[in-house]
Amino acid sequence: MKITLHQIAHARSGDKGAHSNVGLMFTSQELYEWAKINISTSVIKQHFKSIAKGEILRYEMDNLLALNFILGDSLGGGGSESLINDAQGKTHGQALLLMEVDLPDNLSQFVSSK
Amino acid sequence: MSNIIRIGNGQGFWGDSIDAPVRLAKDGPLDYLTLDYLAEVTLSIMQRQKLKNPNTGYARDFLDLVERILPEISDKGVKVITNAGGVNPQSCRSELIQLAKNSGKEIKIGVIQGDDIFPTLAELRKKGVSFENMDTGADFDSIMDKVYSANVYINSSTISEALDKGAQIVLAGRVSDPGLALGPCIYEFGWKDQDYDLLAAGTLAGHITECGAQCTGGNYSRWQDVPNLADVGYPIIEMQPSGEFHITKHENSGGLISRETIGEQVLYEMGDPNHYISPDVCVDFTSFNINDLGGNKVSISNVAGLPPTDSYKVSISYFAGYKASGQLTVSGPNAYEKAQLTAEIIWKRLKNTGVTFEDTSTEYLGLSSCHGEINAFPSQINEVVLRLGVKDSDKNKVNRFGKELAPVITSGPPGITGFSGGRPKAQEIIAYWPALIPKQLVHTSVDVV
C-alpha cells in the first residue's frame, strides 16, 4: 500500500554546522525492521536532492527504533552565514515525513489515518 | 547521599518563555532549576557589550527571573544552575547580591571561570594550539583578526564544586548544555570522573531536557495528540544515584511526555549516536533502555558511557561581513509569476546601478521554500511571500539593497503589499568557528560568595 512516512513515523531535525540531521523514529519493531532495509541513504539522497548538496550519512539506533540521517551541505552555508529561510534545518524532519513509500500490506495495522 | 533529585529545565535558549522557569519553581516540588541562555553566537554579543561597558556581558533576563523566584531560592531551597554569567559572571553576581539585599535576602552565589580564552588567544597560539576549524579543517589565520569571542565548553565538575562550596545559584559561562543537569548529579551522588556510565546517564538526561518544551510535546510530529500546549509544562529529570532516571513534568500542566516525545528529542541535533562527545564523557546513545510508564512519565536506564576525549571544544565567533533580507507579499491572479517578475526587477535595478553581491537568495514563502522539490507544484496559488536576501563584505551595498524593495510596489506588477517595518538594514554576520584545545591548557576556577 502507498502511504506517506508521516502515517507511520516520527521525525525531528536540527543543525550540525553546515549540515542538518534528521532523526526518523518508529513505534513498532516491525516498522523499524522494514525501515532499516528500505530507507537507505540512496532513498534519502533522492528525496532530499533539491535540499542536500553533500553526502548522506545514516546511523541505526535499535534501542530507540530510530534511524539518524546527516544531510550534508543542506543549509545554504549554515548558521548565521546562511541567507535562506530555514537556515537551521528545523523543517527537514517534516520534509522527510512527506516521503511516499510502498509498505507491505501485512504492516497496514500500523498505519495512522492522520 | 540523596535518594532522588528533581532537576527542571526552564530555559531552552535565550528568548525562551520567561514564565516557564517561574512555574517550574513554584508549581510543584523541585530541587534544581537549570537555565540555558547561550546560543553559539550569544557570547560574541556579550563580549562586545563588555568592551563598551565593563559591567555588562551577561544575560540580564536572568536578573528579572531571580527577582521573581527569590523566595523559592532563599526559603524553599531551590538551587539554580545557569550559563547566564556569559563573559562577565562577576558583574552578574554583584547585581544579584544587591537585588537580593534589596528584598532583605542573602544568597550564596558561585562563579565559574576559565572558559573565556579570548584574552589569551595569542598566547595559546604560541603554545601550539592551531584552532583550525574542526568541521572544515580551515586555517585559523584566515579569521584571527576578526574574532569576537572564544569560549571553551568546560567540564561539569566545576558546577559540582560550586554546589559543594554552598552556592545557591551557580553562574557559569560556557559549560556544555547537558552539563547544567549533570553538575548537580555529580554533587548529590558523588559520581566520580571515571564513572562513565553514570556521567553518560546525567548527560543524556541533560540532552533530553536542554531544549525545554521540545521533549514535553512541543515541535512534536503527532501534534494532534498533545493536550493544552498553551499551558505546556517544562521537563523535570528525576535522577537516582544509580543513573536510572525519569523524565516528567509538574501535575496539571499541559503537554505530553511519552516514549515518542522523549525519543524525538533524543534525536535532536544528533550526529553519530555511538559517540556523543561532551567535556565529561562520550555517551553511547544506542545503549539505553526507554520505558513509557504512562501518566507523563518515561523511564530511562542502562546508559553506557566511554572515556572522554583529551581536548575540549572551543566555540569561537568572528565577523564575517553583512547581510540583509526583506519580504513582499504578492497576491491575486498569477501570484507566483508576478513574484518571479518582481524578483527579476529588483535584481536588475540593483545590477543597473552597479551593485552586485557575494551571495543572494530568492525564495517564495508559501511555495516550497522549506522543502524544495519534495512538494508537487500546487495547481493554484492565491498569494506568495517573496523573500530576498543578500550578503556582502561591503555594508553600503547591503544597505543599498534595502532601498530597492519598496519602490516595486508602485513600479512593479499589481497586488504587492506587506512592506512594513521599514527598509531592511545591514546586519553584521557573526559566524561560528568550532575548534579544539588540549584539556591541560584550560584552567578553571570556582569561587562562592
Image (cartoon, grey):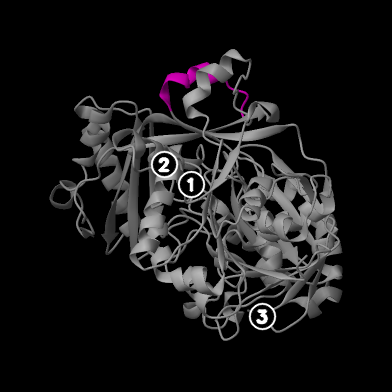
Residue corresponding to mark 2: A83
| Chain at tag 3 | A
Residue corresponding to mark 3: A113
- Give the residues drawn in magenta, as a range: B136-147
Which of the marked residues, 3 or 1, is nearer the chain's N terminus?
1
Nearer to us: label 3 or label 2: 2
Say what amino acid the circle numbered 2 marks. Answer: Leu
Q: What is the quadrant of residue B424 in the picture? A: top left
Residue corresponding to mark 1: A87
Q: Is residue A39 visible?
A: no
* Label 1 residue SS: loop
Say what amino acid the circle numbered 1 marks. Answer: Ala
At label 2, counting other C-alpha atoms closer than 10 Å, the crowd grade (few under 14, some 14-19, many 20 or more) is many
Q: How many marks?
A: 3
Q: Going by the picture, which residue comes out furthest to the top?
A: B126
Q: Residue at x 63, y 70 (%)?
A: B236
Residue A58 image point, x, y percent? 76, 47
Say what amino acid the circle numbered 3 marks. Answer: Ser
Rounded to the nearest angstrom, the CA distance separating label 3 from label 1 is 32 Å
* Label 2 residue SS: loop
Frontmost residue, B13 versus A21: B13
Rounded to the nearest angstrom, the CA distance separating label 3 from label 2 is 37 Å
Frontmost residue, A32 versus B348: A32
Q: Residue at x 44, y 44 (%)?
A: B90
Residue B373 image point, x, y percent? 54, 52
Residue A8 image point, x, y percent? 72, 71
Which of the marked residues, 3 or 2, is nearer the chain's N terminus?
2
Q: Residue at x 66, y 47 (%)?
A: B156
Q: Is residue B418 visible?
A: yes
Check contact, mark 2 vs mark 1: CB within 8 A.
yes
